[in-house]
Image: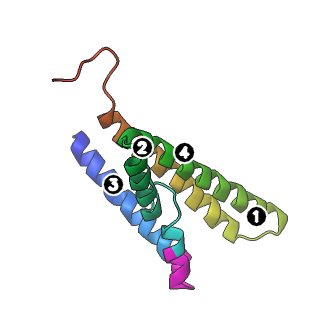
């Protein structure tokens, strides 16, 4: 049952991200590509960033932790920029920034839970060597 829920949520996540990227890139394909290459973990740039950290540090879990923190920072910045835009200049497009930032925040948290939950051993358990 949990496998079905996981695959459904993963498909919904991919669909929502596709909509977000298409919305950002509808005016210019370069903007969409630039957005996708931000070092925020659910985006491709975040996965590249995590891979570089993994290569540099030699620890996948450490690279994931750092990359998800950076992804969450980008998400909070987007949410703050959207709220600021909404209340200072009255731009309704600020709601899109809030929505995309919220999505990135949730996706970064999900990535950390899924990746680090499967990578880190439980307290008191021993590796089978």
Q: Nearer the viewer, mark 1 or mark 2?
A: 2
Tag nearer the camera, 3 or 4: 4
Q: Determine the residue located farthest toward the left in the rendered image.
A: 129
Residue marked by disc 1: 86
Residue position marked by numbered label 3 in the rendering = 10
Residue beneath disc 4: 69
How many other residues sit within 10 Å of disc 3, few (<14), some (14-19) or many (≥20)? some
Distance from the alpha carbon under mark 2 to that under mark 4: 16 Å
Q: Earlier in the sequence, mark 3 or mark 4?
A: 3
Check if mark 2's residue and mark 3's residue have beta carbons within 8 Å.
no
Q: Which residues are magenta?
A: 24-33
Please tell me whether mark 3 sits on a helix, a strand or a loop: helix
Of residues 81 and 40, the one nearer the viewer is: 40
Whether residue 48 is in magenta: the answer is no
Q: Which residue is mark 2?
A: 57
Q: Are marks 3 and 4 in contact (CB under 8 Å)?
A: no
Q: Secondary structure at mark 2?
A: helix
Image check: 54 left or right of 101? Answer: left
Q: Is residue 23 visible?
A: no
Residue 68: image x %, image y %?
A: 49, 47
């Amino acid at each position: 049952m949990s496998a079905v829920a996981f695959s459904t949520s993963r498909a919904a996540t991919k669909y929502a991200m596709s909509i977000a990227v298409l919305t950002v890139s509808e005016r210019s394909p370069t903007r969409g590509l630039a957005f996708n290459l931000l070092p925020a973990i659910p985006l491709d740039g975040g996965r590249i960033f995590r891979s570089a950290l993994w290569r540099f540090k030699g620890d996948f879990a450490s690279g994931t932790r750092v990359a998800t923190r950076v992804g969450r920072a980008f998400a909070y910045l987007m949410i703050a920029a959207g709220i600021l835009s909404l209340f200072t200049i009255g731009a309704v497009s600020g709601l899109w920034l809030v929505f995309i930032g919220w999505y990135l925040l949730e996706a970064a948290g999900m990535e950390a839970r899924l990746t680090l939950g499967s990578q880190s051993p439980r307290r008191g358990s021993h590796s089978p060597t």
